[in-house]
């Protein structure tokens, strides 16, 4: 008997969509915390992520690293 459910696979398109949504959430949190420049940078990165996959994730990681090193 086979299971009635199947595991969803994470293809490139789904991974890119997830990255964009994650970057948008990071942007909203940055605005909420009063980090306007970071919020705008993340928002721009999310918009460009459809053309350059992974850009939003890279910008998010770069900003987090920059805050830790201050």
Image (cartoon, rainbow, N blue to C red):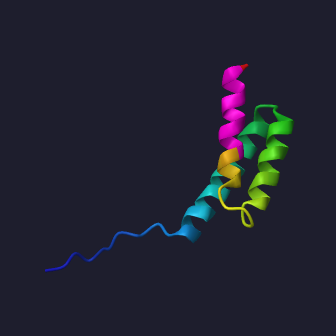
Q: Residue at x 85, y 37 (%)?
A: 36
The residue lying toward the viewer, choosing from 27 and 70, is 70
Q: Residue at x 70, y 52 (%)?
A: 56
Q: Which residues are magenta?
A: 59-69
Dominant secondary-structure state across the stretch colored magenta: helix
Q: Residue at x 80, y 42 (%)?
A: 39
The residue lying toward the viewer, choosing from 28 and 56, is 56
Query: Where the N terminus falls, by quadrant?
Result: bottom left
Q: Residue at x 77, y 53 (%)?
A: 45
The residue lying toward the viewer, choosing from 34 and 63, is 63
Q: Quadrant of residue 69?
A: top right
Residue 62 part of the magenta segment: yes
Residue that lies at the very extreme toward the left in this rendered image: 1
x, y percentage for residue 33? Answer: 76, 32
Residue 30 part of the magenta segment: no
x, y percentage for residue 28? Answer: 74, 45
Report the number of discs. Answer: 0
């Amino acid at each position: 008997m086979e299971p009635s459910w199947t595991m969803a696979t994470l293809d490139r398109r789904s991974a890119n969509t997830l990255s964009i949504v994650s970057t948008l959430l990071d942007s909203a949190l940055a605005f909420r915390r009063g980090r306007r420049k970071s919020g705008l940078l993340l928002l721009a990165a999310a918009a460009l992520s459809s053309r350059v996959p992974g850009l939003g994730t890279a910008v998010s990681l770069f900003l987090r690293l920059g805050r830790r090193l201050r």
